[in-house]
Image (cartoon, rainbow, N blue to C red):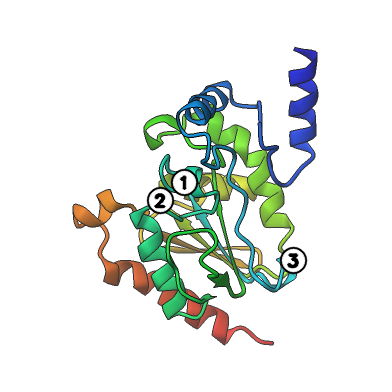
Amino acid sequence: MEIRAALCFLAVMSVEPSPDCPICQRLHDFIAEWRIKEPSWHNAPVPTFLPVGGIDSVKLLIVGLAPGVRGANRTGRPFTGDYAGDLLYGTLSEFGFSRGTFAARPDDGLELVNASITNAVRCVPPENKPVGGEISNCRRFLTPTIEQFTNLRAIVTLGTIAHQSTIRAFGQPVAKFPFSHGGQNDIGNIRIFSSYHCSRYNTNTGRLTTEMFKSVFADVRRYLDDLPE
């Protein structure tokens, strides 16, 4: 127990969780199971994907929900290895937030431009459903992740959970900044843009169309372009 407590303390002090983060027992045990099943996979908390210009170049942050089992949990890069990444990275490229060819591999050479991607929960949850305590626990990483981007001006939250955790990371009540697709809220000098998550389920059911998703990033692009230098 003393070792576990020490590891938890160190995790609190970091922007990124440790590779064997012990804070959420259920998620820790779930990843351990996948390490046995697929030892060649990433099978660890997925770190924030940073742009070529480093943290000081980040003007846009995309906050997703959590890694998918066969997506980021396998590849180690957010939104890489499942359908959600196809839509997200294609959209980022169209609006100038990435360059290179996305090939659903962490070594595909794709680079982010003035943008960064993270998740509200860094470890893969069973059935893609983190519970409340896990979301709260992982905010100890989301909050400093946001704070490290001193030139951040826009955040896109993908889905209700990512949106609410982002609002709480700012120390604000979620009731004051409700989630809605296409919604926009200002907290200080940062504008938060909300979108349905770009999951296959949402696109297959028609809840989110490609046009709906791209319209959010078109708004982001216009907003950032209109900011004074």
Amino acid at dot 3: Thr
Residue sitting at x 46%, y 72%: 92
Dot 2: element: loop
Q: CA distance from mark 2 to mark 3?
A: 24 Å
> Which label is found at residue 199?
none
Residue sitting at x 56%, y 86%: 226
Residue extending furthest top?
1
Dot 1: element: loop
Amino acid at dot 1: Leu
Dot 3: element: loop
x and y percentages locating residue 224 in the rendered image = 56, 79
Amino acid at dot 2: Gly
x and y percentages locating residue 12 in the rendered image = 75, 35
What residue is shown with label 1? Answer: 65
Q: 102 left or right of 140?
A: left
Which of discs 1 and 3 lies nearer the camera? The answer is 1
> Which label is found at residue 150?
3
Say which label, 2 or 3, has the lower sequence index.
3
Q: CA distance from mark 1 to mark 3?
A: 23 Å
x and y percentages locating residue 96 in the rendered image = 50, 80
What residue is shown with label 2? Answer: 159
